[in-house]
Image (cartoon, helix red, strand yellow):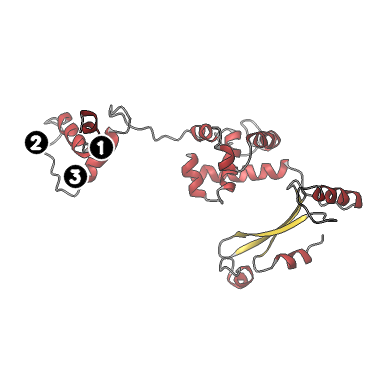
Amino acid sequence: MDEMETQLFFDPVQEAEKYIEASTTLDDVEDISRLDRNDGDTEPFLFSAAITLFSVPNGEGERANFERNNGVEWYRRMRRPGVFFKRVRMTESSFDVLYNRVKPCMRYPGDGRVGHPPKIHPRIRLLHVLYWLAEGGSLLLTCDTADVSESTFNRVLREVLSAIECALPTPMFPSSVDGQSKVAVEIVNLPGCLFRKVTGVIDGTLIPIRTPPARMKVSYNWRKCFYALSLLAITDSRKRFLWTRSGLPGSIGDSRAFKESRL
């Protein structure tokens, strides 16, 4: 084993112990004896000191910076090539188009609304919510990964979802024959499509919810033993929403939900 390999194998706790004893004077402690490694409180202290001492790659013993930067560094990592689409399930160009449409409806300093707007940049706020949606709606995962507090993210979530609802057009299923014929032609022209006279593709999903009131538990309990709301949607050949309906109990099937709709 050469000298370089020998330097890689060292005990960080022992190094921290040497560093503490070397930097400790008689005025700092009452007992000048060595630190007792058998003491239950000494070992966690040495590990904490070792983490602080070796927090910087060059080993200069500088303290790590644990302050939040409002997701700036996380946003830079997300915009790296090949990372954005994998994490958000959206191309960067589509994100820029969505941001330009949603930005006028988001909070900014001096907008005249009640309360203070979040200090996070609007572009980062939008990316936070899209990442939350793409990762399955995990609050803790989003906050830990994006380096934001839970209270801040809750404010951002309500603001951005309201801005998206305000900025984007309401899904409207074509009521005229010409509009339905246009959608049917686009679906037929899809590669490998064998269906004709199709004016949309319908499917349903479930949105998990917390325990509903006791008198309504049965209707919201799905066959896979969790409570949920039913969401039904129709899209065209370009996966654009033409019609949506949500809020029905999770025990209702897609066919029944569609029959009870006014479409």
Q: Residues within 10 Å of mark 2 (few under 14, many from 20)?
A: few
Residue designated by label 3: 42
* Residue type, mark 1 in image: Ala
* Residue type, mark 2 in image: Ile
**Vertical side of 100 occupied by 181: above or below:** below
128 with respect to 27 (left or right): right
249 with respect to 120 (left or right): right
Residue designated by label 1: 50
Which quarter of the figure is the C terminus placed in? bottom right
Residue designated by label 2: 32
* 129, 200: nearer the viewer: 200
Mark 2 or mark 1: which comes first in sequence? 2
Q: Residues within 10 Å of mark 3 (few under 14, many from 20)?
A: some
* Residue type, mark 3 in image: Thr
**Vertical side of 185 occupied by 125: above or below:** above
Q: Nearer the viewer, mark 2 or mark 1?
A: 1
Q: Residue 165 appears in which quarter of the rendering?
A: top right
In percent of the image, x 62 and y 33: which residue is there? 108
Q: Residue 245 appears in which quarter of the rendering?
A: bottom right
In percent of the image, x 87 and y 53: which residue is there? 175
* Label 2 secondary element: loop
Q: Nearer the viewer, mark 3 or mark 1?
A: 1
* Label 3 secondary element: helix
Between the residue at mark 2 and the residue at mark 1, the CA separation in whole angstroms equals 21 Å
Percent coordinates x, y for residue 221 in the rendering: 60, 69
**Vertical side of 139 occupied by 82: above or below:** above
Q: Are marks 2 and 1 in contact (CB under 8 Å)?
A: no
